[in-house]
């Protein structure tokens, strides 16, 4: 058995993904200078393997190759083998993924790259089967061929490495001239999104289809800005189709990573913290914009799932749940009619299977079905002659019963490392949703997360990247925070301040923004992904596009813009504008790759509204005023609040503002002009609607 083998060097790591490989027969090294020194001393290449814990094909390659004694012996003989968790080291992943894409035209994980001992890539790919299969060369053959090339064609290998290193540097640049961000930038982005939209199932592209929460949020922003009904219809269709599809966990809440088809039915089953953080916010914004209760249910069920299954005892949020359980992809989530009947009985199971489209033939594998909702409950109630509310209550009760039954199954593996950047995304989701819905559990979770990161993952005022709870307590990995860690966490802190009006969170966000400007500045208006004093790599990475997670530069620009309003630091607004000019043309032409940058651009174009609420934050009259501010989707509203004493604490929006006749008062300003302060919610609602 693999676990009887002695451990390799990965046994000392904190990453669950690396620990999964700690008893492979491969003599794995973690990323670091020691591995490269070993390669130089032995005069062999580096075999770099990059993946993550929730990656299905990473597990397959481990079972087929890394647990294979013969293949492991070849790896150990001819290479120094280095294993990297892409979520711990996005800088390493980005550089070598660019290399693989340049070499093969595509990328993905697991990623397998062969490097010279000075780190230059010369050959690589993604998943390799052990023997020739699926039109792919077998890993044994690849290993022997690369080893032969290193021994007998060293000059060719070195030349390939030098050329690729140069191309990687070029690939990180945008070949466009900086341009101002204008309303026209946003309009062109919307037109391009509309042109590529899937009007049948929502979203963009065919199979596999990925959620695009940043882009959907931009559509809601465009509708709020212009009243354009196409933007709202596109967002509505996509949000509804995803909520009814198998990509959404109909029993437990939360979203799977993506759909293998174009209609959101069959997912790739891993659940990622970053997807659920972003989608929860987008569904909250959808509810604020439309008052569709479906969106509210999805937003709250998603955050409830995170609190239930993805929250650590200290307050940090875990990273991911696996797609596999008991060695099978999706086994935890799929059902047969017989399994449902055994739990619910004949009559209830018939209704449940009808509503959630569970059939004898199945939609997944061998008669197994992913739960989905082909028709809304109103349509089913009409067909059955039932009252929709009564039918919904019955279905909800059946969902709870089947969820309880599912809890008895073997759960997918949990990646319980805490990543600061992803925690920042979830912090923003918990804080904003808690504030809008007045959910104290969400607000408590947001505060606990902020306190946890500050306590466990800040050393001498500097952020670390990640850590994990061990038997002896929380252990942070010695990996400095990246741009995205600083920007995402600062963004979450800004939302936490606006949710609680606790000044400490605004102060911490300001300190992190100062670090972004001091340590990540690229000298040309943008930001590097790594700090000036980070480990030197063959290139200093700079990712300008928003992918499954936002680019650090996109969030940094938005944070600087919001903090400029809250703190009065006008130079931060100019600095953010300079950053956005770098991608203005690209975000207009290729909006799917710049969804979060478009949020910042929308805020920059304005108008921005500033609302100061002064009074006792615990009083009913204060809460009534902020409730009015939060009830609708107002993405470019900046909110400050607190007692009169706060006015002297250097928050410009509060300075000089006092209650009216002893009652909490709201001061609304826009375009350097302020309205009359008001104390009643109706008057504030009228001002905000004007």
Image (cartoon, rainbow, N blue to C red):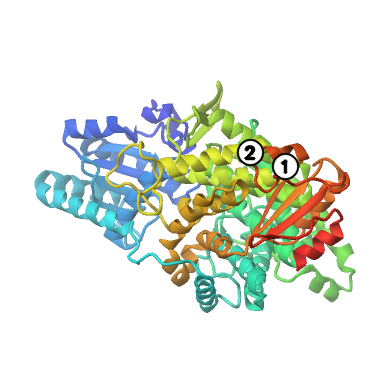
Local SS, label 2: helix
Return the x and y of residue 140 as percentages of the image width and height: 26, 47
Q: Residue 451 or 55: which is nearer the viewer?
A: 451
Tell me which residue sits at (67%, 43%) in the image.
497
| Residue 353 visible in image | no
Q: How many labels does the image show?
A: 2
Nearer the N terminus, badge 1 or badge 2?
1
Is 129 on the left-hand or right-hand side of 270?
Answer: left
Return the x and y of residue 138 as percentages of the image width and height: 29, 53
Quarter placement of the C terminus: bottom right
Return the x and y of residue 238 as percentages of the image width and height: 63, 69
Is 314 on the left-hand or right-hand side of 488?
Answer: right
Local SS, label 1: helix
Disc 1 crowd rating (10 Å Cα; few below 14, some 14-19, many 20+) is: some
Q: Which quadrant of the view contains residue 27?
A: top left
Q: Residue 513 or 36: which is nearer the viewer?
A: 513
Q: Residue 604 or 530: which is nearer the viewer?
A: 604
Furthest residue toward front? 656
Which residue, given by chain and number where applicable, does mark 2 sit on? Answer: 505
Q: Residue 576 or 97: which is nearer the viewer?
A: 576
Q: Relative to 13, is 673 above or below? A: below
Tell me which residue sits at (15%, 45%) in the image.
150
Return the x and y of residue 306 as percentages of the image width and height: 66, 45
Quarter placement of the N terminus: top left
Q: Relative to 14, is 194 above or below? A: below
**On residue 500, which mark appears?**
1
Q: Do residues under tags 1 and 2 come within 8 Å of each other at their CB atoms?
A: yes
């Amino acid at each position: 058995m693999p676990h009887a083998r002695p451990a390799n060097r990965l046994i000392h790591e904190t990453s669950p993904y690396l620990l999964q490989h700690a008893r492979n027969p491969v003599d794995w090294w973690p990323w670091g200078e020691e591995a490269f020194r070993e390669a130089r001393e032995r005069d062999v290449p580096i075999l770099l393997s990059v993946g993550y814990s929730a990656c299905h094909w990473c597990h397959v390659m481990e079972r087929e190759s890394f647990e294979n004694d013969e293949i492991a012996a070849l790896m150990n003989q001819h290479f120094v083998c280095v294993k990297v968790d892409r979520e711990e080291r996005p800088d390493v992943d980005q550089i070598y993924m660019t290399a693989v894409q340049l070499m093969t035209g595509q990328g993905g994980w697991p990623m397998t790259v062969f490097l010279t001992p000075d780190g230059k890539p010369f050959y690589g790919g993604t998943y390799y089967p052990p023997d020739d299969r699926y039109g792919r060369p077998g890993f044994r053959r690849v290993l022997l061929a690369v080893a032969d090339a290193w021994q007998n064609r060293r000059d060719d290998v070195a030349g390939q490495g030098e050329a690729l290193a140069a191309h990687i540097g070029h690939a990180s640049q945008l070949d466009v001239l900086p341009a101002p961000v204008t309303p026209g930038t946003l309009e062109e982005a919307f037109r391009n999104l509309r042109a590529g939209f899937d009007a049948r199932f929502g979203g963009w592209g065919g199979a596999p289809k990925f959620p695009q929460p940043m882009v959907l949020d931009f559509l809601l922003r465009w509708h709020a800005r212009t009243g354009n009904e196409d933007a709202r219809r596109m967002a509505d269709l996509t949000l509804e189709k995803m909520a009814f599809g198998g990509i959404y966990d109909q029993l437990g809440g939360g979203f799977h990573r993506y759909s293998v088809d174009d209609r959101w039915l069959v997912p790739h089953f891993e659940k990622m913290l970053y997807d659920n953080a972003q989608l929860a916010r987008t569904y909250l914004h959808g509810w604020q914009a439309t008052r569709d209760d479906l969106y509210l249910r999805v937003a709250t069920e998603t955050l409830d799932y995170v609190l239930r299954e993805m929250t650590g005892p200290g307050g940090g949020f875990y990273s991911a749940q696996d797609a596999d359980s008991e060695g099978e992809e999706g086994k935890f989530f799929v059902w047969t009619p017989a399994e449902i009947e055994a739990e619910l009985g004949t009559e209830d199971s018939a209704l449940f299977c009808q509503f959630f489209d569970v059939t004898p033939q199945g939609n997944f594998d061998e008669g197994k079905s992913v739960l989905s909702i082909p028709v809304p409950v109103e349509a089913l109630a009409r067909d059955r002659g039932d009252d929709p509310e009564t039918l919904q209550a019955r279905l909800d009760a059946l969902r709870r019963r089947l969820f309880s039954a599912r809890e008895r199954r073997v759960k997918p593996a949990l990646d319980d490392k805490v990543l600061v950047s992803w925690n920042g995304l979830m912090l923003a989701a918990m804080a904003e949703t808690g504030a809008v819905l007045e959910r104290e559990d969400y607000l408590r979770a947001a505060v606990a997360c902020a306190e946890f990161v500050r306590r466990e993952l800040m050393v001498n005022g500097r952020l670390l990247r990640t850590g994990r709870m061990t038997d002896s307590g929380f252990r942070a990995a010695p990996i400095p925070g990246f741009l995205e860690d600083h920007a995402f966490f600062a963004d979450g802190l800004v939302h936490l301040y606006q949710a609680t009006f606790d000044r400490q969170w605004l102060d911490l966000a300001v300190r992190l923004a100062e670090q972004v400007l001091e340590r990540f500045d690229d000298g040309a208006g943008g930001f590097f992904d790594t700090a000036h004093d980070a480990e030197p790599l063959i290139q200093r990475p700079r990712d300008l596009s928003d992918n499954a997670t936002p680019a650090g530069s996109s969030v940094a620009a938005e944070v600087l813009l919001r903090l400029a309003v809250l703190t009065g630091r006008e130079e931060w607004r100019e600095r953010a504008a300079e950053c956005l000019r770098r991608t203005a043309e690209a975000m207009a032409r290729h909006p799917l790759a710049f969804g979060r940058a478009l949020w910042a651009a929308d805020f920059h174009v304005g108008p921005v509204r500033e609302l100061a609420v002064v009074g006792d934050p615990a009083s009913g009259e204060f809460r009534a005023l902020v409730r009015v501010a939060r009830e609708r989707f107002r993405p470019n509203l900046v909110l400050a609040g607190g007692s009169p004493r706060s006015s002297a604490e250097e928050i410009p929006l509060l300075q000089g503002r006092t209650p009216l006749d002893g009652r909490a008062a709201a001061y609304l300003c826009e375009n350097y002009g302020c309205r009359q302060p008001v104390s009643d919610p109706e008057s504030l609602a009228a001002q905000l609607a004007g």
